[in-house]
Structures are given as C-alpha cells and as structure tokens.
Image (tube, rainbow, N blue to C red):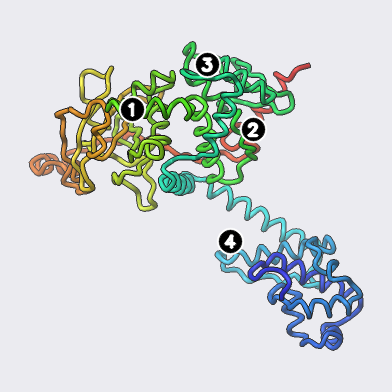
Amino acid sequence: MTAGTAGDEPDLITLGRRIRHARTGAGLTLDRLGERVDAAPSLLSLIENGRREPKLSLLRSIAAALGLSLNELLDPEPPSRRAALEIALDRHQRGPLFAGLGLPAVKPSQKLATPVLEQLVGLHDELARRAEEAIATPEEARRANTELRLERQARDNYFPQFEQLAEDLVRDAGYTGGALTHRTVAVLAERLGFTILHVNDLPRSARSVTDLRNGRIYLPPASVPGGHGLRSLALQAIAHRVLEHERPRSYAEFLRQRVEITYFAAACLVPQFVAVPFLEERKRERDLAVEDFRDAFGVTHEAAAMRLTNLATVKLGIPLHFLRVGDDGALFRGYENDGLRFPQDPTGAIEGQLLCRRWAAREAFDRRDVATEYYQYTDTPTGTYWCSTQTGSGDTGAFSITVGVPYAHAKWFRGRDTRVRKVSTCPDPACCVRPAPELAERWSGEAWPSARMHQQVLAALPRGAFPGVDDAEVYAFLDRHAPE
C-alpha cells in the first residue's frame, strides 16, 4: 500500500515539503533521518522533492521519527507560506508550459531568498494566465465546438435529464399544450424566485442580465410583439440557475453551457410530452413538416428544425441532418447523424466551410418563391438525401435552414414527391469548386477580386467576470437598476 495515487504529483510535492519542513524543524539531516527509518538518504531526498512515492510503512516510520501522526504528515495543506511558494514553483516547472520554453529549472532550495521565490512564482502565474488567455481564440473555440458536435452526434443530440427537468417545470407552471406563453414563462420564473423585467438600456454585449441578489432577470424590450426570442432568452437565463452553472473557465465550458441552456429552453418551448405525440401522428400520416412543427409551438423555423434533431432519432427512429447556411454558402451551424459528410477544415471544424453549390441549402437561394419550403433530392458520395430548406434574412444577411434525411426516410415527410434532383460529387474540386476549363483559360491571370471578410463564427471571447461581456458595463447596469 502506498500513500496517494500513482501519478498524483501535486500531493507528492506537498507531502515531500511537509516531510522536509518537519525534518529541518527537528534539526535532522537526511543522513540522520535515514538512520532512524532505515532508508537511504537519496531515497528520502527523492521523496522530499515529490519525485518518489513512499510506501505506507516508510511513511509511518518517518512520522514516528519526526514526532508526528500519520494524518499530520498527510495533511494536504502546505506547512508554511514558504513551503507553499516552493510547491507552486515546483509545479510550474514540471508543467508543459515551462517545458516548452527550454529554460533551466530553478531549484526551490532553502538558499533561494523568499522575495526571489515570490517573484518567480508571480511571473509563472502571469505566464500561465496569459497562456490561458491565448487559447481563448477562434481556433480553440472551433476545436471545442467540434468536440461538442461529435459528442451530440454520438448521443443523437438527446439529453434526457434536460427533457425531464423542462417538463417538470413547465407542467408546474400550468402548461398543457400549444405555444408556451410569455405569461407561463413569467410564472415559471416566479416559481424559481425571479421576476422578468424588460429594459431599454441592457448592456450592448449582453443578451440578458440576471440579478441574483434581488431575483431579477433583465431582458431587452420586444422588437416583435409576441415573438419567440424573448421567451427563449428568459428560459436560457433561467437555465443557468436551474442547471447550477458556474462562471466558465474555458472555451469548452462556455460552449457547453450554451448548448445546455439552448437545449433546456427548446425543451421548455417545445416540451417532449406534447411534441412527440404531435410528431408521431404526422409520421403515421406521412406528413412530417418543419413548418407545421414550427407553427404548432409558435417558435422560429430554426428553433423547430433544431428541436427536431433532439427528438427525431430517439423518438421516431429517423436519422437526419441540420444546416444553417449563409447566402455566401458558408456553413454557420450543422449537425448530422445520418452519414452526410460535411466539409471540414484540418482540425475537423465545419463552421465557415463552403458547402457544395448543388446542395439544397444553397440551391434554395435561387428560387423565386421564398415563402414556402424548398424540397430537393441530392445524390452524394455517401448516399442520396432528401432535404427541406427554408430561407430567411437577419441582421447578418440572408440564410437558409435545412433539415434532411437519407432517401429511405423521405417517405415520412411532406415534399417527398419533389422532382428536383441534383448530383454532388464534392469534395471532388471538379464538382463546383474548380472553374470550367474554358473560363479558367479565358480569365486566368486577368482577374483580381477583392475578397470580402467573412464574419468569424466562433470569435475569441474577452476575458473577465462574464466571458464575452463587458464586466464594467454589466456591474454599472445592475447598480443602476437595483431596488432602493
């Protein structure tokens, strides 16, 4: 039996410093302590430096020789301020950040003056802080987002714990079916101890602000009376509290929280216990349609399409994919568990990648009637897919929302009888990336377009008390609105 767990270096470092502190306090050298416990001084030196895990029998002998109990020796707290600094420096110098600098290590021995030790630890702390800040970049966000997308894919984008929690809360607030009203959302908030207030001076960098001290959720005023957006914002603010979120310490944690609060809000706006029977009935009638699902619950087309990804596979047995695409062809958001191959960058991220021009998500921009859904079959290298696409426009320009399924599952959907069929051979450049040979010959070397900057889908977050938000503005806002 040994003390601690193999590979648990921080505990070994603290243990070693406690032994050294007690040994020097007792006026013993390593040689004298080695004689008392029948151990080589070199072994004791390794233990004191946190580089060797001692056996429990040796630890008991050391404790007895130093006049301590075993519990005192295993106390996880450093024995002194000086020891804490030595441990901190040791940990920093054993980490990958320091190793990457290629600098010689400084031994935190007794000969090292305490002010020098404090300065070294302070510099390492700042170096670690800046390194953490440096990874809060679009590249890190894309990596973390890719991991989340693959995780959601593996579970068919279904989170039963959030479904049940949302169902319990909306039932308790009086919901029985149809669109979740603003009043029901307000009741739900009140049951949790919050009052929803709409203000005109919400910080520009914040979607909502929650005053935990006074139980208030501040939202912007409605731009469209009765719109879906404010209900979703309120439910997402509530979700942070219900799901017991703490301030995110990394991009991955921030993005995971966004996924969780968005899912919770969707599960409240389109509760499973009402949505699944609705979808099952439409499937029996072979008349599934995103637009009907949208209208039945009073949400946006995108929200209905995303909610379908939560329920279609687990509850209806239908694999599917979802796309939000800009009018420039760039993929803004995507999900699939039906084998459709999205374009990816070398890290596996799909955000910002250009979709094939033959896919329905892009073909839909060229039609004249944009009021209804556009249906299309597309033959791809991974199979044939049927897709339903709706276009719209927002602050950042036109976009399309697509839900698609493999050919075998098109039979459940309205629009399956479309005669529109396209062929995509992407990622083969000859499909739609490479220009026609005659055009390339005519214009090669004679054209010079000025590229438009693409909006970064996952931009770096300013660090602070609230990631991505102006801290000073938020605190000033809360102080301005706090009750007397």
Dot 2 falls on a residue whose secondary structure is helix
Mark whose residue sits in front, 2 or 1 = 2
Residue type of the residue flagged with mark 4: Leu
Q: What secondary structure is marked by label 1?
A: strand
Label 2, on which residue?
241
Disc 3 designates what residue? Answer: 181
Q: Determine contact: label 2, label 1, CB under 8 Å.
A: no
Q: Are marks 3 and 4 in contact (CB under 8 Å)?
A: no
Report if residue 365 is visible in the image: no
Distance of label 3 from label 4 (alpha carbons): 52 Å
In the picture of the structure, the residue carrying the numbered disc 4 is 97
Q: Are marks 2 and 3 in contact (CB under 8 Å)?
A: no
Residue 104: percent from left, percent from top: 63, 71
* Label 2, label 3: how far apart the Cα atoms are: 21 Å
Amino acid type, callout 2:
Arg
Going from N to C along the chain, the mark reached first, 1 or 3, is 3
Q: Quadrant of the C terminus?
A: top right
- Residue placed at 57% from the left, 68% from the top? 102
x%, y% of residue 116?
77, 63
Q: Is residue 416 left or right of residue 160?
A: left
Q: Could you say whether the residue bearing mark 3 is in a helix, strand or loop?
A: loop
Neighbor class of circle 1 (other Cα within 10 Å; few <14, some 14-19, many 20+) is many
The vertical placement of 80 against 164, above or below, is: below
- Nearer to us: label 1 or label 3: 3
Q: CA distance from mark 2 to mark 1?
A: 32 Å
Q: What amino acid does circle 3 point to?
A: Thr
